């Protein structure tokens, strides 16, 4: 098995997570650990989406009502979580909120 990716959180992502209910925080953190530690680039129809560039993140992870926006650095084996946003009826923001 390949070396796991280290997950790092931007300040904005930490603030987003802290603003959630405790049960939602656990769901988001568990989902990030489960899906992004070993195959952060594994695009699927329902879970991980590669964002069309130019965009402010490379990928989006869907976790029920939450969207985790992140970048992957394969050389350093890092996943940079940029934002954790609640799903809304608005289109995906073109710029980092």
Image: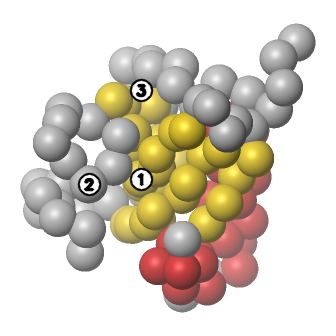
- Residue sitting at x 38%, y 66%: 86
Q: CA distance from mark 3 to mark 1?
A: 15 Å
> Residue 74: x, y in percent?
60, 30
**Crowding at mark 2 (Cα within 10 Å: few <14, some 14-19, many 20+):** some
Assess whether mark 1 and mark 2 are in contact (beta carbons under 8 angstroms). yes
Q: Which residue is mark 1?
A: 69
Image quadrant where residue 53 sits: top left
**Crowding at mark 3 (Cα within 10 Å: few <14, some 14-19, many 20+):** few
- Residue sitting at x 26%, y 54%: 56
* Numbered circle sitting on residue 15: none
Image quadrant where residue 25 sits: bottom right
> Left or right: where does residue 97 sit relative to residue 16?
left
- Residue sitting at x 56%, y 54%: 80
Q: Quadrant of the N terminus?
A: top right
> Left or right: where does residue 59 sit relative to residue 18?
left
**Element carrying mark 3:** loop
N-terminal label among 2 and 1: 2
* Numbered circle sitting on residue 46: 3
Which residue is at the front of the view, 10 or 45? 10
**Crowding at mark 1 (Cα within 10 Å: few <14, some 14-19, many 20+):** many
Q: CA distance from mark 2 to mark 1?
A: 9 Å
């Amino acid at each position: 098995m390949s070396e796991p990716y280290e997950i790092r959180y931007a300040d904005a992502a930490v603030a987003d997570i802290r603003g959630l209910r405790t049960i939602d925080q656990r769901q988001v953190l568990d989902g990030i650990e489960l899906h992004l530690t070993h195959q952060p680039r594994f695009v699927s129809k329902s879970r991980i989406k590669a964002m069309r560039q130019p965009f402010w993140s490379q990928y989006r992870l869907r976790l029920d009502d939450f969207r985790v926006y992140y970048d992957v650095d394969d050389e350093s084996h890092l996943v940079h979580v940029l934002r954790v946003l609640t799903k809304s009826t608005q289109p995906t923001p073109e710029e980092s909120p």
